[in-house]
Amino acid sequence: MMRLTRAPARLIAYGLVVLSLLLLAYSQKFVEIPMSRIDYFFLNEVKPESSRTEELNLICILCQSSNIELGSDLTRQIRQASVMLKSAVMFSQKLLHFHILADNSNLYSRLVNMTLGWPEIYKRKLRFSMHPVWYPEGRDDMRVLFRECATERLFVPDIFPNIEKAIYLDTDLIFLRPVEHLWDEFNNFNQNQISAMSPCLYHYGSERNKIPFFGETGLNAGIMHMHLKRMRNMDGGWTNANLAMFEKYKDQISLADQDILNILFHFHPEKIYELPCHWNYRVWQCSQGENKCTSATDQGVSILHGNALTFVKFNHRETWGNPNIPGVNTRLVFLLGMVSDVAKQNSVKKEAMQYKDIVQGDFLDTYRNLSYKNVFGKLWVSNFCEQADFVVKTDDDMFVDLYATYFFTRQYLVSPEYNDNSFLLCPMWPPTRILRDKKRKWYVSYDEISKKEGGDLYPPYCSGYFYILNPGTSARLVVAAQTTKFLWIDDAWVTGYIAKKLKIKQLDIKLLLKRKMKDGLMIKSIQTPEIYHKDILATPNGRNLEISQTLNKHAYWCYIHQCFNNIYHPSTNISNTKDVIEDGVLSK
């Protein structure tokens, strides 16, 4: 465990983060070239050898975000796509025809430019063509679900009426086997199957999911075999079937096209071939002490999928983690456990020496050890930051408006809960059912919590996304943890069972948190000193650097100009002013 030193602070923010992320950041000089040159070079100069005359059709999507104010992640997408292309041509012998669905030609040319300096042995395996983004008439409402154009893949059969088969690929993939081996999975289709996707293995079996889904764990749509001819010949039409699923379940959908596809194949399971999970291997599948993908144990990993921005190193130090609040000291701290890999541990030590903001505990950093990490963080705070007014705990995929949080928490400095060190300010979960099904991710056995100890309901507890306490409360929770029966579900254990033992009642601020990034971004982006609209303190940021930088700048501006909202003007009687954006208007 690293040596701990005191750090003067008034507001401490810390996140539970795992620093075993793969960084793929390539410095590329962009050179604009005419579209005619691109078409000539890649459509005419490619002369495949006879041994690889078969052309494999692969589809990718690149779209410019329509919300320029919040920034876009185009650079990330294009760099990821470049890495994916490199891995594809490195292993394959076939001609790979990448059909790029893009909403402007500049995106297409940027991607193609990145391949111009590649060796000829690789370039001659590539063919590119651009296709405009298309949505059915009157369905532009689907374009901005989840991420820009994410739902475009639902309409691929109509966009390519003359192609029989193709594979859709997310940009955040790394091939570890030839693309033609992935293509060969089409040979395993029976006469009824029209598509193939790998099992999701998480999310769809949880209480967060509100929709029907395929199989036991749902499907991940990052790699999708598409027998386009059969899709077009589907009874009632492929596009109509997807639109019908969307209309029926649109209020419950959170993952856009992937949710729609899961709903569709829930009702038509005979039409889907389940692609082995080693063809869509995500890092978390081997991050909790066991391999969740059994076929990878035998076959090895064929494609590494960096979903949820796994391949992007997000730096909180450059965004909301170090606010410029006049006259206020803040300190950002990253909590880690130990990693078994020597190279990774050395990397952590190097980063800790450079930034002096990493605190590492003497336990393995695994999902089942989050309760240890949680209490460890509170132990560090109570020993080395007892002078802080407040402590903010959050996750590494969140944006926290520390300017608004600082202003908002001033009112609690004189509260009885604060002075009694019983202060826990959080979005609160009411008593929720303890999951006893062994197939569920958060399964808890009766040995862990018996009926006598807890019945079938957790006590009220805080959402781990974001909560606020003071150092004195942290110290009390640490002491009580030593005599409270352990539970590996950290939020329920620390802010539920231990808080209940200490008779700490959570102060609920669920209205100040948005769990969906789209909703949070809309609310934060329209804050202004002139027009009233309720504000929030925290929202997911998708680990998007540009979005967090933009939100942090706007948060500072709001703090300086005292935006007209419930945080900076809590006593405002909005019935006396006409300048109000009412709740629900933005979502409409």
Image: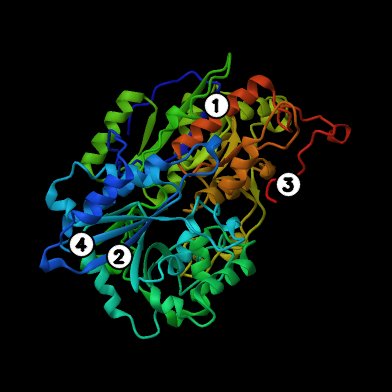
Disc 2 and disc 1 in contact, CB within 8 angstroms: no
Residue at left offset 50%, top offset 62%: 257
Q: Any mark on residue 553, and which?
A: 1
Residue at mark 2 to residue at mark 4: CA–CA distance:
9 Å
Q: Name the residue under label 4.
A: 95
- Residue 571 picture location, percent across and down: 81, 29
Task: Kindly indicate whether the residue at mark 3 contacts the one at mark 1 (C-beta within 8 angstroms).
Answer: no
Q: Is residue 146 left or right of residue 47?
A: right
Q: Which of 110 and 175 is in front in this view?
A: 110
Residue at horizontal 47%, vertical 55%?
Answer: 133
Q: Do the residues labelled 4 and 3 touch (CB within 8 Å)?
A: no
Which is in the foreground here, disc 1 or disc 4?
4
User: Can residue 311 be seen by looking at this rendering?
Assistant: no
Across and down, in percent, residue 435 comes to 54, 65
Considering the numbered disc 4 on the image, is that residue within a helix, a strand or a loop?
A: strand
The x and y percentages for residue 525 are 62, 36
The answer for how far apart the CA atoms under marks 1 and 4 are is 46 Å
Q: What element carries label 1?
A: helix
Secondary structure of the residue carrying tag 3 is loop
The outermost residue toward the right is 576
Counting residues from the N terminus, which is met first, the one under dot 4 or under dot 3? Answer: 4
Mark number, residue 585: 3
* Residue 62 appears anywhere in the view: yes
Residue ID for mark 2: 57
Report x, y in % for residue 296: 26, 65
The answer to whether 82 appears left or right of 237 in the picture is left
Q: Is residue 3 shown left or right of residue 437? A: left
